[in-house]
Amino acid sequence: MSGSTTLAGTVGAAAQVVLVAAGSPLLVGVMRQVRARLEGRAGAGVLQPWRDLRKLLRKEAITPHGTGPVFRAAPLVLAATALVAAGVVPIATTESPLDGAADLFAVTALLALGTVALALAALDTATAFGGMGASREMTVLALVEPTILMSVFALSVPVGSTNLGAIVNSTLHEPQRVVSPVSLLAAVALAVVVIAETGRIPVDNPATHLELTMIHEAMVLEYAGPDLALVEWASAMRLTVLLGLVANLFAPWGIAGADSGWVALAALPLALAAFAAKVTLLGGALAAGEVFMAKLRMFRVPELLAGSFVLALLAVAASFFLA
Amino acid sequence: MKDLLRKIRKTGRVAEDPPERPAESAPDALRELGGSVQLRHVDAGSCNGCEVEIASVFGPVYDAERYGARLVASPRHADALVVTGPVTRNMEMALRRTYEAVPAPKGVIALGDCARNCGVFAGAYGVVGAVRDVVPVDVEVPGCPPEPEAIVAALRGLTGR
């Protein structure tokens, strides 16, 4: 590995963190705008999530009576894990200097760490809705994590490595792998769990006002001001990272690969633009799909997630038998 | 799904064109919100006439969300309370606690004649008083119930858009 390759990797990793940090609220804005237009409304504009965050940062921070350090630390942990995940997942470059951590287990564990921190904070508030939201989120998480692991595992079998960068690189070199049964089964399974993990319809409704139907929102009911801004920003980043992971595992074209020297550096702007386009497209499709769907009953959610787990299991089996 | 898609295409945009920006502006404390106002609705004893109008304000036709206003589920997330109805004895403490739970800077909108001066319920045995007798009020919207246009104008005064 030459010196400039590492430079391109370092610059790429920094650029993708900046892109995800600045762009994820815009993605949420685009998704809300798509929904608004399909519902016949005018919509608040793509910049509205950033306006909300700016206003929340100016507001007073409140520590509800009886909450402790867990409640205070959770937004920081959530945002930190999302930022690290944005740095290690192959978004713009597969040559991140944190490549050793870009292991599929590490990324899944990072995202789970943020979720668990928020669930503990919800329990810390000792409110009825906080506990209810935490228990529901843990139910969903317990069903989602194995499916994420299984589906990416299915993709890693032909490559012989669980490193996300290596998987993306090998798909770049053998594009026919994208239409193999392994890849298609894993794509469907992963798409379902990404929808569940990011709390979108049909698993959770991010726009709900009704506490009894909430999952993610119920956990953050007690956060105010800057803490709430951190939680919302981190949620947007997680959505972007997970959509980006799906996009780059199954359509990695445009990503800056292992070119040497200045070629890799020059490929970065293109890679960032390609990533932004892919994620905007995926997010828009997700928002458009939500218009046609109602939220599932809580008791039906495990059936949906079990179905996606079966698909992931089939993908793993296929990756062994069809290899 | 095909029917719904056809309906979406046929219906197009339902939202009416935004009227002229109202001249009235927000109270100074709320001016720094900068185009984003989250609202928590508190029914302090309303007959639900005002609630119907609020629902249509956030519906597709008036679409108050395009001015940066949004209803939220928790007073902790809110910048302003929308209070409807005369304050009844059972809701007095709830309203006071909800107001205390809102992080500063915060405001209160008294929506409808009942919230402003108890309306037809003035002097009733279960009524404590108007909203301003319990929490400080920044904006008042008259009407029984107020028209959606009036509510939208009040909200635009807060968001400044």
Image (cartoon, grey):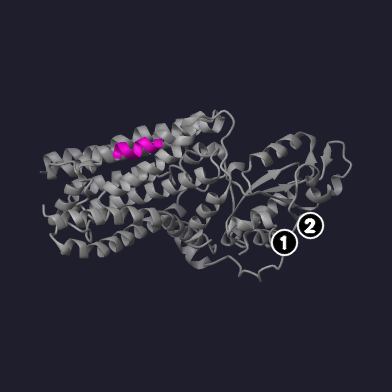
Task: Report the span colored magenta.
Answer: A108-115
Rendered view: A231 above or below B35: above
Horizontal relation, residue B136 to residue A153: left or right:
right
Q: Is mark 1 on a helix, strand or loop?
A: helix
Residue B74 can be seen, yes or no: no
- Whether tag 2 and tag 1 are in contact, CB under 8 A, the answer is yes
Name the residue nearer the viewer: A160 or A288: A160
Q: Mark 2 points at which residue?
A: B142
Q: Tell me where residue A282 sits by quadrant.
A: bottom left
How many other residues sit within 10 Å of disc 1, few (<14), some (14-19) or many (≥20)? some
What residue lies at 24% left-to-right and 62% top-to-bottom?
Answer: A268
Q: Mark 1 points at which residue?
A: B150
Q: Which of marks 2 and 1 is nearer the N terminus?
A: 2
State the image coordinates of residue A73 (x, y, percent, origin top left).
45, 35
State the image coordinates of residue A86 (x, y, percent, origin top left).
32, 49
Q: Does A311 appear in magenta?
A: no
The C terminus of chain A lies in which quarter of the figure?
top left
Q: Is mark 2 on a helix, strand or loop?
A: loop
State the image coordinates of residue A299 (x, y, percent, origin top left).
45, 33
